[in-house]
Image (cartoon, rainbow, N blue to C red):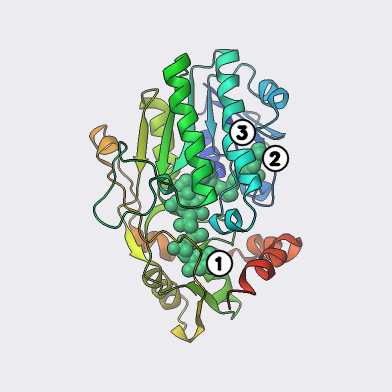
Amino acid sequence: MKLLVCGGAGFIGSAFIRRTLAKHPDWQINNLDKLTYAGNLDNLREVEDDPRYRFVQGDIVDSEVVLEAAQGVDAIVNFAAETHVDRSIAEPEAFLYTDIIGTHTLLEAVRELGISRMVQVSTDEVYGSIEEGSCDEAYPIAPSSPYSASKAGGDLQVMADHRTYGTPAMITRGSNTYGPHQYPEKLIPLFVTNALEGEQLPLYGDGLNVRDWLHVDDHADGIAFVLEHGEPGHAYNIGGGNERTNLEITGIILDELDLSDDIIQRVLDRPGHDRRYSLDCARLADMGWAPQVEFEQGLRQTIRWYRDNQWWWKKIKYGTEDFAEWKKRWYEERI
Ligand code: NAD
Ligand code: DAU
């Protein structure tokens, strides 16, 4: 099996590459990644010299680059996306470009090269806020942010291409993912790294928004399962079954680091902030797949990983201008 992984230098894509190469000694992976602010080759240090692995820096919107990187592959797994909801509110264009046009370019390559399978990695955010109950894959799509609207645009293209051209593509819709190597703008790594540096934790609104947390290894494995066992034209929810408020998450972080809740800072809420996400994952469960990582243990291990690998996130927070610029732009007006 030879794969083209797009966006493999990011948080979940890099976990997928590391785990796939470890599990399948005879598989090869081309990793096509633009290396935006979120792309990080430090995430791939353990495979960079592996002869089965090849890195190509490039943009999934560029069809020439995609066609070259996809030569001879059996399948494409697309992680490449702009992924931060707050950035999509501040500056949406890049989201439309990568998450919509980029997905289209990959679908065209699948058709042109006759590639056997494509997995489009999507998100539970396409369903919008779920005030009650849980949503299965037939639930209507109702995105709230420019990010989730762009991801929904990718999903709709996959479905339409399958129906129109028979393109052998499928979708995964994962829930909020946590673990090592996550860019420290997202809730858990932001709060852990701020806490480690004695900074405040900017909690939006009343802190009672609910997310369903999934360990990155489980997310990567769920996507691998869909790649092998999914049916083209179908979507697959991948949830952790761990619904927690942001305040509960913050409490575990403070407890693990032995800090008091004085460092919680209530800040202006995110506009359009979805109250709750909740996935019905019966489809994958019926096929025999379930997440493995126990939540509180996984979260505490993750917190310790950021405590013990400060070189990794300090390089991001202080090695370039991006993080500081984002922090100033977004948080100054919320405090
Ligand atoms: P990330 O932001 O950590 O990484 C995204 C990667 O895509 C980076 O390496 C970046 O350089 C690359 N990239 C961005 N634009 C590109 C382009 N035009 N061409 C090529 N590469 C490009 O993202 P992540 O958290 O690992 O998420 C991966 C996928 O999973 C995304 O599609 C996201 O929507 C989805 N997802 C994420 C979560 C989560 O909680 N993190 C949950 C559900 C679904
Ligand atoms: O649900 C899946 C999605 O999860 C993915 O598709 C996205 O790519 C990923 O970024 C994530 O989106 P969220 O918006 O849920 O994640 P984020 O870490 O940005 O926020 C999680 C919750 O924490 C949310 O309710 C907002 C809140 N929050 C976030 C930040 C950054 C705060 O209270 N303060 C903050 O500073």
Q: Which sits in the foreground, 259 or 131?
A: 131
Give the residue type that dot 1 points to.
Answer: Leu
Tag shown at residue 34: 2
* Residue type pointed to by label 3: Gly
Estimate the spatial distance between the alpha carbons at disc 2 and disc 1, rounded to whole Å.
23 Å
Which one is in front, 323 or 27? 323
Image position, residue 89 (x, y; %): 58, 57
Q: Residue at x 61, y 33 (%)?
A: 101
For marks 3 and 1, give the one nearer the viewer: 3
Q: Residue at x 47, y 77 (%)?
A: 257
Q: Is mark 2 within 8 Å of ligand 1?
A: yes
Mark closest to the chain's N terminus, 2 or 1: 2
Q: Is residue 293 above or below residue 255?
A: above
**For numbered disc 3, what is the local secondary structure?**
helix
**Residue 202 place in picture, x, y as percent:** 53, 74
Residue 258: quadrant of the picture:
bottom left
Which comes sooner in the sequence, label 2 or label 3? 2
Disc 3 Cβ-to-ligand 1 distance below 8 Å: yes
Q: Secondary structure at mark 2?
A: loop
Give the residue number, with chain letter if any, for mark 1. Answer: 190
Where does label 3 land, which residue? Answer: 102
Q: Residue at x 62, y 50 (%)?
A: 92
Q: Position of residue 165 (x, y in %)?
A: 48, 14
The foreground one among 321 and 164 is: 164
**Within 8 Å: ligand 2 and the Cβ of disc 1?**
yes
Q: Secondary structure at mark 1?
A: helix
